[in-house]
Image (cartoon, rainbow, N blue to C red):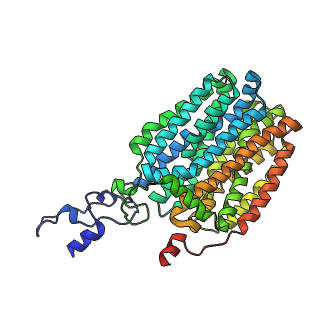
Amino acid sequence: MLSDVTQTTGSAAARDDDRPTAPATPPVVPAVPAASAAPAVSGRPSRRRVHRAWIVAAVTFVTIIGGAAFNALPGLLIEPLNAEFGWSRGEIGLAVSIDMALYGLTAPFAAALMDRFGIRRVVVVALGAVAAGALAGVWMTAAWQLMVYWGLLVGLGTGAMAMSFSATVTNRWFVARRGLVTGVLTAAGASGQLVFLPLCAWIVDRHGWRPASVTVALAALVVVPFVWLLLRDHPADAGLAPYGGEYVDKPAPARGAARRTVRVLADAARTGPFWLLAGSFAICGASTNGLIRTHFVPSAHDHHMPITAAASLLAVIGIFDIIGTVFSGWLTDRFDARRLLAVYYALRGVSLLFLPFLMQPTVEPPMVFFIVFYGLDWVATVPPTLALCREQYGEDSAIVFGWVLASHQVGAALVAFLGGVARDVFGSYDVVWYASGALCAMAALMALVIRRVREPADAVAALG
């Protein structure tokens, strides 16, 4: 019997810190070796100690904030770069679109690279790339340098820490509370916006755009020690079960990361839900990162609103984005993800149709209402989208979500570029707001027609 327990559960010495220690008693029988004791197989935390999964989630949250600091810059620097170098909004928008496109296209490969080399190594290299791109931009004098530093380096770095990073952490470390954790980690990007937008706006206003670029580079570098010292690739590295689950051994490194990523895409592309998820999420990116994050500040400035005031409104979006995304994660654990997506996209589309009428030189109550309303909806789409990927594609869901995220960023990149072109051509952003509102209505319909899977894809495959 003892050998059966040992074979089933493995060594307790490596995993006994996830359960309380029994009180010592005088030995009346020969002592059982520690390696033979049964470990705790439940991933629930004991009463005495917080489960390590929550520490990993906290480090991931801080890492995403540090990596996302650069996202606060582009909308603030369109005017200063145009004034100093004479670059058109279309040229600056092209650099931002390269960044966003690479952010998305890197994400699925990053998920596979994390399976091959580990989360810590990939994330540390990614933070270094973001810092290098932001610092190199301080010395640029030509538009092509903007596209290399901001587009290539920063795009690759932020892409490796995209939402597939949080999806990988969530899938490995959590079985219970996945929706909630997804919502919290998704909100980290908004938290970075909340922290860095007002700060960078103040720096740009008082000291110019170069110190702001240095600031976001330092923010990326500061996070590196936390990642290296506190982040762990897998619960088995700490001798633990995932939160809410049973202990599993750490899998061997997955070789052929690029080949696997492409194979997963080829398999997913043969299914209808993939295209519906990718198409709706492309519209999500177009109507958030591509539109509001890139063009809201210059659009408000067109109506004589100070840049610092417009940046503060974006920061307020970040506050309510955190609330909305965490609440969306809670809802995703309880309700049909397809219907949640349809509601989110429909409400977003309606709000965008009203935005051109709300632009004023000063911040009026209707604009505040829009900011709160839009903030609650900003990335509330992520938890249900990730839940649908997990439901449809099982163990490959993190990589599939990476490809869906790629479509999100392609949509964002197109609108970041086309929005700048539209402003150059029409002298106004109004046509962009209206078109994005109509696209959101289309996304709501796409979400509703995704077929429902009654059992997770990996469970169905196991039964087959």
Specify whether 451 is left or right of 227. Answer: right
User: Can you give x and y, in whole percent of width and height, for residue 295 in the image?
Assistant: 76, 39
The image quadrant that residue 11 belongs to is: bottom left
Residue 291 visible in the shown view: no
User: Can you give x and y, in whole percent of width and height, for residue 217 in the image?
Assistant: 55, 31
Toward the viewer: 361 or 218?
218
Name the residue at 74% across, 58% down.
345
Q: Is residue 29 above or below residue 112?
A: below
Q: Residue furthest bottom?
A: 464
The image quadrant that residue 213 belongs to is: top right
Toward the viewer: 160 or 48?
160
User: Can you give x and y, in whole percent of width and height, for residue 6 in the image?
Assistant: 24, 68
User: Can you give x and y, in whole percent of width and height, for residue 234 in the image?
Assistant: 40, 55
Name the residue at 44% across, 42% down.
227
Q: Is residue 205 above or below residue 233?
A: above
Specify whether 232 is left or right of 443. Answer: left
Specify whether 197 is left or right of 421. Answer: left
Residue 415 visible in the shown view: yes
Q: How many labels, in total?
A: 0
Q: Residue furthest right?
A: 426
Specify whether 459 is left or right of 312. Answer: left
For the N terminus, the quadrant is: bottom left
